[in-house]
Image (cartoon, grey):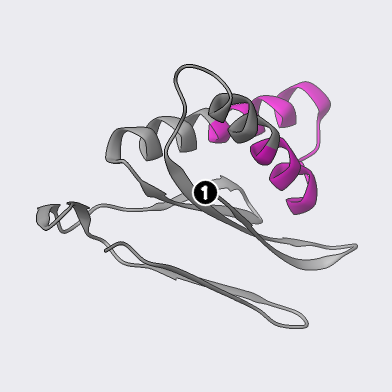
Amino acid sequence: MEYLIGIQGPDFVLVASDNVAANSIIQMKNDYDKMFKLSEKILLLCVGEAGDTAQFAEYIQKNVQLYKMRNGYELSPAAAANFTRKNLADYLRSRTPYHVNLLLAGYDDADGPGLYYMD
């Protein structure tokens, strides 16, 4: 089993994950990092099929960086969650769905902390 946990308070978000990559009862890796830094204030935690998690998280990570380069400012956690949710929904309706579960945590100066779950 793979685990992600997230706790949101009035002025913080706390996230944690295990480091195991497993398939059924077989433990393939015990040092697999499931946290991906999208920006200075946004973190994506991803579990599921090993190849799907790495590919989807890197795709989201690179697109968030591209947005910052094109527009000169970072996405808010809510906007990053909306972008991630839309892409995940589009891929689930395609012939090559990503089998991933996600937690997206971030802090926005205007809105405060945000914690979002997607599956």
Q: Main secondary structure of the magenta part?
A: helix
Residue located beneath label 1 in the image: 37
Residue drawn at x 64%, y 39% is 84
Please rate how many residues cluster around mark 1, counting C-alpha atoms within 10 Å: few if below 14, some from 14 to 19, many from 20.
some
**Residue 75 inside the magenta-drawn segment:** yes
- Residue type of the residue flagged with mark 1: Lys
On the image, which quarter does residue 74 sit in? top right
**Residue 10 inside the magenta-drawn segment:** no
Coordinates of residue 81 in the picture (x, y in percent): 70, 47
Coordinates of residue 36 in the picture (x, y in percent): 47, 48
Q: Nearer the viewer, residue 84 or 72?
A: 84
Residue drawn at x 36%, y 66% is 3
Residue 92 position (above or below residue 77)? above
Residue 97 position (above or below residue 30)? above
On the image, which quarter does residue 105 sit in? bottom right
Q: Quadrant of the N terminus?
A: bottom left
On the image, which quarter does residue 106 sit in? bottom right
Residue drawn at x 17%, y 53% is 24
Please provide the residue range marked out in magenta.
Answer: 60-85
Residue 38 position (above or below residue 65)? below
Residue drawn at x 44%, y 20% is 96
Q: Kindly give the residue lying farthest to the right in the view shown.
A: 110
Coordinates of residue 15 in the picture (x, y in percent): 51, 70
SS class of the residue under badge 1?
Answer: strand
